[in-house]
Image: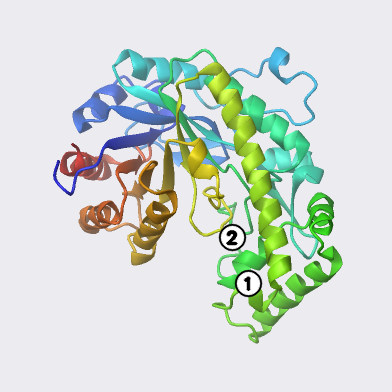
Amino acid sequence: MSERTVDRIVAHAYPWDVLGDPHFVDRARALGVAEISLAASYHSTRAATPLHPAHKVVDAHHAALYRPIRTAAWDGHTVTARAATWAGSEDAFADAARILIDAGIEVNAWIVLSHSTVLGHAHPGATVVNCFGDRYPYALAPGHPDIVRYARTLAAEAVRGVDLHGVSIEACGQLGIAHVGPHEKTDGAYPGIGDTLMSISCTERERALWTDRGVDPDKLTAKLRAGVDALTRGTLAPDAAITDVLDEAEAEAVLSVRHAEADALRGAVLGAVRAEIPSARVTLHGHPNPWKTGPSPALTSTAAEDVDAVLVSAWPGTAETVAVTTQTRALVGDAVDVGAYVSVLPPKNLDDVSGHVAATVAAGANELHLYHLGLVNAVQLDALGRIIRDFSV
């Protein structure tokens, strides 16, 4: 194997990319795609489909499970997954997966857990709250019992009855202030340390758990507010450390609660997956920064023990994303695979893609996860093909 090759290349797609397109499989095979992570549950999105013969845009206007919502599975749940009307069939994930599997392509269920605006609005008491009392309706609180139960059932229903290779678990932890929402108007308002401060969830449940750890939640919350206000006035630098705002005990209390909830959520979800598919290969979207929130939240100290691969976002072609790959490899060691999540979509310069991918591989990624077979046009599809040819074993 040359130093530029990787052990595994996975492409991503939505069910509606496959359904209704008789040429999708041929395009995937021509690229050399042998494995696809297919969305089984996903947040709201407006997705381009440039190469699909029947539609060019799909409006997935709320988070949904792309399987039937079975009463037997969801009866008694306070928070219940929503169905989709735009995906191409009632059981869109399974129908699309079987097309791919019949074509000899391995399929992973791509499952998004704690990101759902429609459910957040329906169940505001089960969402993240910042230190000022503002709720983030898109961010389901990962430690809330109703959300843990929802996520466990969501995962079980996503994989039920389909001959899958594995799962790709996204948003297995807390989302924070950063959110690509409708007409987003928060970008850059709270830079650097501000993102960390505005992403600390201060629900009554978390405040009680801080108290259990010997920390006064009122004082902690007041310090967070003062820190954000100081950043806004320009008296706290964006590159300040969390310990410039909280003392070490307070910072440790926040992290220990957040990481414990992520561990519990992951355990419940993976237990449900493995009950259905004992041999499922598990890829976890994560980040080496212990304060990171979002679709790839912080890796806890035990996360690597539970999974086969950690997937880190390397979409921007920057030294920072290469450094994240390096840090992740150092954190998880050699026993766990590290995937670099790379994109050929704008604003990416296609001439720079190969060099950036090579840098992530040199930094320790031994897998590439390619975004995205359905969103690309013909030129971008060719760029995905070059990555596969250049870095395949």
**Tag 1: amino acid:** Ile
Disc 1 marks which residue? Answer: 242
Q: Compare residues 253 and 166 and report the one nearer the observer.
A: 253
Q: Quadrant of the C terminus?
A: top left
Q: Compare residues 302 and 186 and report the one nearer the observer.
A: 302
Residue 239 place in picture, x, y as percent: 54, 77
Looking at the image, is mark 1 or mark 2 earlier in the sequence? 1
Q: Is residue 325 above or below residue 7?
A: below
Residue 19 place in picture, x, y as percent: 41, 21
Q: CA distance from mark 1 to mark 2?
A: 9 Å
**Residue at the outermost bottom position:** 235
Q: Compare residues 327 and 356 and report the one nearer the observer.
A: 327
User: Number of callouts in the render?
Assistant: 2
Q: Residue at x 27, y 58 (%)?
A: 349
Residue 141 place in picture, x, y as percent: 71, 45
Residue 260 place in picture, x, y as percent: 67, 47
Q: Is residue 237 above or below residue 392?
A: below
Q: Quadrant of the N terminus?
A: top left
User: The residue tagged with tag 1: helix, strand or loop?
Assistant: helix
Q: Residues within 10 Å of mark 1 (few under 14, many from 20)?
A: some
**In-image side of 301 versus 8 (left or right):** right
Q: Residue at x 20, y 38 (%)?
A: 392
Callout 1 touching callout 2 (CB < 8 Å): yes
**Tag 2: amino acid:** Trp
Image-quadrant location for residue 216: bottom right
User: The residue tagged with tag 2: helix, strand or loop?
Assistant: loop
Q: Is residue 325 above or below residue 141?
A: below
Disc 2 marks which residue? Answer: 291
Image-quadrant location for residue 13: top left
Q: Is residue 310 above or below residue 84?
A: below
**In-image side of 333 versus 153 (left or right):** left
The answer to whether residue 115 is visible is no
